[in-house]
Image (cartoon, rainbow, N blue to C red):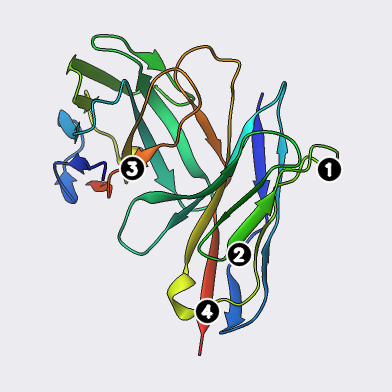
């Protein structure tokens, strides 16, 4: 079956540091890949997505590239801010289900940014 | 903006009680989902629905049932709550059969004592 593996957190960075959160996946076919973010006390929000190999998703300074050869979708940001402190989830969508857009999520990586 | 509203932010129930978690979305989405979120386990799909009165089991349906009588409302039912169902429950919705982003509610934190 499908699975998503994320690096364990928490990740603690100083403001303006470079961020990488690793994500690798196992899937049949050609899944779409997503990063969701969960701020304290809230539900998940879509951060970015990529639907085919070599696509780069980007939003709010974050970006991730769909690498089929390494089955990876690592999240990066050049300069993090305190307001980026949240839990980040990598997810994939099985396009072969033929029904709803089911997502398989990773376990989440907590990011803490300090001044 | 899409709004997914979960009826309760916090719930405390006793073992053996029947529990209803309600979710309403306002964007005419076809698909609706119930996930539970636990530390170290991420989000796990309990049930989903792609149309009124339709439902499909997710990865962990045991101990749960669902109801979708109207397009905008998707209810999760714990027939006899147990302590291992203490968790954060997240409802989500999305458009159609193609891959589309999920829109989540803010979650219901259920404690079963």
For numbered disc 1, what is the local secondary structure? loop
Q: Residue furthest top?
A: B53
The residue sitting at 18% across, 51% down in the picture is B9
**Residue assigned mark 2:** A9
Q: Nearer the viewer, residue B41 or A41?
A: A41
Name which quarter of the figure residue A18 lies in: bottom right
For numbered disc 4, what is the local secondary structure? strand
Residue A63 percent location from the top left of the image: 63, 57
For numbered disc 3, what is the local secondary structure? strand
Residue B24 percent location from the top left of the image: 18, 33
**Residue assigned mark 4:** A113
The residue sitting at 34% across, 51% down in the picture is A43
Task: Left or right? Give the position of B109 relative to A63.
Answer: left
Q: Which mark is residue B104?
A: 3
Q: Considering only order in the chain, which callout, 1 or 4, is on the residue closer to the N terminus? A: 1
* Mark 2 nearby-residue class (10 Å; few <14, some 14–19, many ≥20): some
Q: Residue furthest right?
A: A69
Q: Considering only order in the chain, which callout, 2 or 4, is on the residue closer to the N terminus? A: 2
Do marks 4 and 3 both belong to one polypeptide chain? no
Residue at mark 1 to residue at mark 3: CA–CA distance: 30 Å
**Residue assigned mark 1:** A70
Name which quarter of the figure residue B95 lies in: top left
Q: Chain of mark 1?
A: A
Q: Which mark is residue A38?
A: none
Q: Chain of mark 4?
A: A
Task: Left or right? Give the position of B65 relative to B17.
Answer: right
């Amino acid at each position: 079956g499908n699975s998503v593996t994320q690096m364990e957190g928490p990740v603690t960075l100083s403001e303006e540091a470079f961020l990488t959160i690793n994500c690798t996946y196992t899937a049949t076919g050609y899944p779409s890949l997503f990063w969701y973010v969960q701020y304290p006390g809230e539900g998940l929000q879509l951060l970015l997505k990529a639907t085919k190999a070599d696509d780069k998703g980007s939003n709010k300074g974050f970006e991730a590239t769909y690498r089929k050869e390494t089955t990876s979708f690592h999240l990066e940001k050049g300069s993090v801010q305190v307001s980026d402190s949240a839990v980040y989830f990598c997810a994939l969508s099985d396009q072969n289900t033929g029904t709803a857009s089911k997502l398989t999520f990773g376990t989440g990586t907590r990011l803490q940014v300090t001044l | 903006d899409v709004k997914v509203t979960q009826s309760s932010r916090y719930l405390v129930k006793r073992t053996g009680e029947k529990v209803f978690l309600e979710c309403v979305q306002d964007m005419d989405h076809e698909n609706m989902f119930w996930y539970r979120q636990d530390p170290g386990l991420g989000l796990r799909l309990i049930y989903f629905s792609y149309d009124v009165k339709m439902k499909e089991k997710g990865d962990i349906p045991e101990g749960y049932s669902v109801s979708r009588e109207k397009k905008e409302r998707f209810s999760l039912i714990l027939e006899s709550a147990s302590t291992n169902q203490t968790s954060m429950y997240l409802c989500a919705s999305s458009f159609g059969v193609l891959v589309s982003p999920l829109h989540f509610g803010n979650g219901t934190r259920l404690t079963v004592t």
